[in-house]
Image (cartoon, helix red, strand yellow):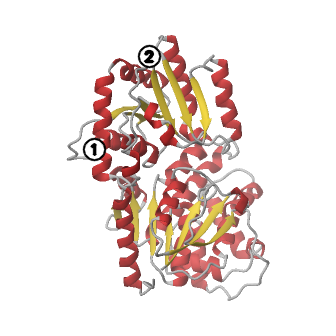
Amino acid sequence: MKIGMVVEGSYPYVSGGVASWVQMLVKQMPEHEFIIIAITPEPIFPEDYRYELPGNISQVLNLPLNMQQPRRQRNFSLTPVDEEAITEWMMFESVRSDALLALGQKLGGTENFFSSGLFWEIVQQSYDKEKQSGSFIDYFWMWRGMFAPVIELLQFSFPDLDIVHSASTGYAGMVAAAIKQQQGIPYLLTEHGIYSREREEEILQADWIPDYYKQRWITFFHHLSRQAYKEADDVITLFARNGELQEEIGADPAKIEIIPNGIDYSRLSLVEKDKHHRSYVHIGAIVRVVPIKDIKTMIHAGNILKSRSVPFKLTIMGPLDEDLEYAGECRRLVDQLGLQDHVFLVGKVNITDYLPTFDVCLLTSISEGQPLAVLEGMAAGLPFIATNVGSCSELIHGREGDPYGPAGFVVPPVNPDQVAQRCEWIYQHPEEAEKFGRNGQNRVEAYYQIHQFIQEYTERYHQRGVEYGRHRV
């Protein structure tokens, strides 16, 4: 089958996380052809790929949010029903499928629409409904900025597919929903983190959005999520709590399924731990050096360990070029705290060269889905200290009925003192720490292997392909 994988701000331009998941899924399904539809803030080019693309990826389409389609005339006249659908959709009153079709196939270019009487009327209605009191012109331009990417994306000429699969809601979910409607094909949605919740956190902290417009932007992203949930045949998440959040936002509980991530257990479980006695605790972190991973909390925890005379080394493994400014801030923080002999940012490396030397692994993210890094460390038999975000608590302590016991500690986000306390405990209790490592290894072997999650998706693709009559191989 020909599968369109729609991603946003991720594969193949970013390492780790969702991008690693996409690479793994595609490589493990050589019987299917994949087309990657990659939505990015600005144009990105093949020389920026972070992965060697598997041979069954036939095309990568880059759709930047600042894209402008060739200027065109309207293909059809908008009917009163079309205008009603567009109005309700843009005012977040409904997630009608016919609104996507009208925006994508019946409008002219964005400039034609933005200068139309219909758009002016919709903005006026919204301004009055929200009881705005600021500049109407500013409000009008805010609307243009919000919906220009939507219209440009929906008017793209997508290739013919048998199945469309998005790795998030948001713009990716909206595009996948539109492709489903245009081509009459099945749509699978896999949501790793809760996209609209993550955007909400970013918007509340953003300086570039005036406070009186923030609620509209928050509602916009929840609206996109509800559209994706409505159109998707399967709403897949990685753990139970995320499914509950999806339902709260608007997903039909009958569609929600849990398919956990999987990793190459057989390779990582064979990592032989370095048995040489060391006089310090070696802490490892498999992580992208970006703000959402909160590397600075790790560094501050290291400073607390140093102040308590706990001998340690912290090795942070992950790309340093995804956010150069933040990586530079982290390096400077290491220097300012005098931790040059303790904390090492080694960049992207082969983790199996380092795992044998670690006593414990660390993740201090402020937001996560189901982090592959935790599964990889646990597969290698290492205890973990992780923040209580995403599925980390479930991975460390197990789901209901799990017989394996704790695999480490869960700590609050942005709490270097508790991170340091748990690292110190690992140093003082090496035998108990090894038991944590065995518990986690057993859990990954039982529930989180790559062949398990690939089998789940293979079955979903086949099932939906048969239902829609698109199951050619």
> Upstream in the sequence, badge 1 or badge 2?
2
Name the residue: 32% across, 47% down: 444
Question: Real-space Cα distance between discs 1 and 2?
Answer: 28 Å
* Residue linked to disc 1: 442
Q: How far from the left and from the top, in percent, is residue 389?
A: 43, 41
Q: How far from the left and from the top, in percent, is residue 366?
A: 50, 38
Secondary structure at badge 1 equals helix
Residue situated in front as seen by the camera: 451 or 271: 271
Residue 208 against residue 412 in the figure, above or below: below
Name the residue: 32% across, 42% down: 441
42 sits to left or right of 168: right
Residue situated in front as seen by the camera: 63 or 124: 63
Name the residue: 60% across, 68% down: 37
The three-letter amino acid code for the residue at tag 2 is Ser
Quadrant of residue 48 within the rendered picture: bottom right
Question: Disc 1 vs disc 2: which is toward the camera?
Answer: 2
Name the residue: 30% across, 33% down: 436
Secondary structure at badge 2 equals loop
* Residue linked to disc 2: 279
